[in-house]
Structure formats: C-alpha cells, structure tokens
Image (tube, rainbow, N blue to C red):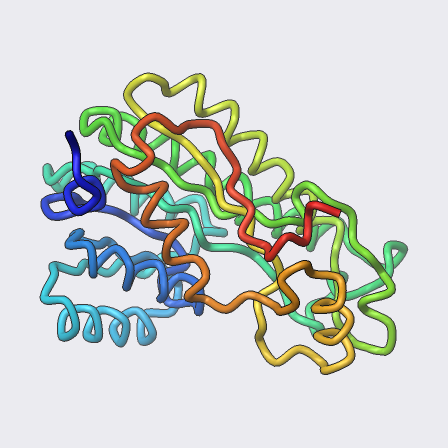
Amino acid sequence: MAVLRDLMNLHGRRILITGAAGSLGRTMVDTLAELGATVLLVDRDAHALAQVAEDLRSRWNVDVFCFETDLEDQAQRARLISTVCDSGEGLHGLINNAAFVGTSSLFGWAEGFAGQKVETWRRALEVNLTAVFDLCQGFAPLIANASGSIVNIGSIYGELGPDWSLYEGTAMANPAAYAASKGGLLQLTRWLATTLAPKVRVNSISPGGIARNQPSSFITRYEARTPLGRMANEDDFRGAIAYLISDMSAYVTGQNLRVDGGWSIW
C-alpha cells in the first residue's frame, strides 16, 4: 500500500514552471523545492529569478536552473524549448503559470468594452494561450518519456462572467482578452488530457481572487460574495499544486481544480 510521503516525493524529478518570479510562482516553486524537485525557473525578470533561485537553494538545498524568457516572443520560447530538450536531462513536469495580466496604464486594457484594443487582445492571447500551446507541444515528448504531468494555471474568469458591481468606484478591470484566453486554456487542458494520454496527465487550477492590495471597497464586496469570507493568499495554492504535479493525483487528468473559497458555487 502506498503512503502519502512517497506519493508526494519529487526527488529526482525535474519540473519547469513559467512566471516563477511572480507572487504565485514563487509559492509554487517553493512547494516543489520542499518536496525535493529540481526546478527550472522561467521568467522575463532575470534579477528576480536570481533572487528566487538563491532563496530556494538556501532553504531546500535543491538544484535550480534559471531561464530568462519573454513568453510573448515566439523565438525566445523556441530557444527555451531547444535548450531544455537538448540538455539530455529530461523533464517530468510543466507548470504553465505565467500570465499576461496588464496594468491600468496599458493602452486598450483597463477600459470598458468599447475601449479595449485588438492589439492588446492579441498580446494577452499570445502569453496566456499560444505560449502554453507552444510549450506543451515542445515539451510533450520529454514529459511523456517520464510519464509526467502538466498543470495549467487558469482563472475563475475562464469559466464565469464578471460581476461588475465589485468594480464600481475603482480603477480595476476585467478585460475580455483575459477571460477569453483563460477560457481557452481550460479547454486546451481538456483537449491535451485526451491527446497526450496515457503517458501525460494534464490538469488545471483556477484561482479565485488573490489579495494584493486591491481597494478596500473591492475587497469588502468580494469577501461578502465568497462563502469562505476572504480572498485567497498564495499559500492557499500549495496543496493544489503539490497534488496535481505529484503521484498523489496519478489517476486524475483533464480536471480543473477551483481554488476560490467557494466563489463559483453560487
């Protein structure tokens, strides 16, 4: 009979995660390192990547490799795929965590529907969906050889429409491109799950709202609408990623795990 300690053990496994220097990415890679994985960190911020790598090595004494990559650039994606595949070291898991989330100052992003721009729409789909397709396609042979796992990080807004009353009086946005790209990502997860089976498992996680210094009015409204009565924090995702990337979910594929405090059950 298997024991949980062995099922969640990632020693000897190499796992690549994109968006590794972001808030959620840092928590996920720390979880992987705690479980013993060799981690391959991908982000466009080289300085932040170096800081994450140093922290992981000192905390968990694991092997860490950094790849400065802008996933919006197809040539850089191709270089990343080539470098990892040509290393001869194999790959046991892929976590597609990087996302184009924009800012209030980005032209054609934090606007009403009439003001959202096609150019910005394309940028969001390139990072949030096309890059994931590209990486999954490029790394699939390696992951299949290891009978490994792919985890895509989606969003509740890949399944649900926005409640605009939450945003009243704030500069926050919920652009169509973000929702459409995350919705496409969830369907890509299901498509890949049947296409890459039985050698590769493919699942997704859909986070709810994560507390990141949003306006107090938004937080109050959001929490009032959430059964667990609060927004998420990064640590809420440790168990989800550990479960889906490890052998604890060895008979799970094509699933979307909502980590949203119950938001989506209304």
Query: In this view of the protein, which residue sits in the foreground, 242 or 182?
Result: 242
Q: How many marks?
A: 0
- Which residue occupies 46% across, 42% down? 152
- Which residue occupies 56% across, 38% down? 185
Q: Position of residue 160 (x, y in %)?
A: 73, 45
Left or right of residue 116, residue 140 in this image: left
Left or right of residue 21, residue 93 in this image: left
Left or right of residue 90, residue 213 in this image: right
Query: In this view of the protein, which residue sits in the foreground, 101 or 231?
Result: 231
Q: Position of residue 253 (x, y in %)?
A: 42, 27
Which residue is farthest front?
1
Q: Quadrant of residue 194?
A: top left
Which residue is farthest right?
114
Left or right of residue 79, residue 163 in this image: right
Is the N terminus in the top left, top right, bottom left or bottom right quadrant?
top left
Q: Quadrant of residue 115?
A: bottom right
- Which residue occupies 78% across, 79% down? 217
Q: In this picture, is 94 found above or below 208? A: above
Q: Position of residue 197 (x, y in %)?
A: 36, 18
Q: In this picture, is 231 found above or below 100? A: below
Query: In this view of the protein, which residue sits in the foreground, 72 or 252?
Result: 252
Q: In this picture, is 106 found above or below 148? A: below
- Which residue occupies 87% across, 72% down? 168
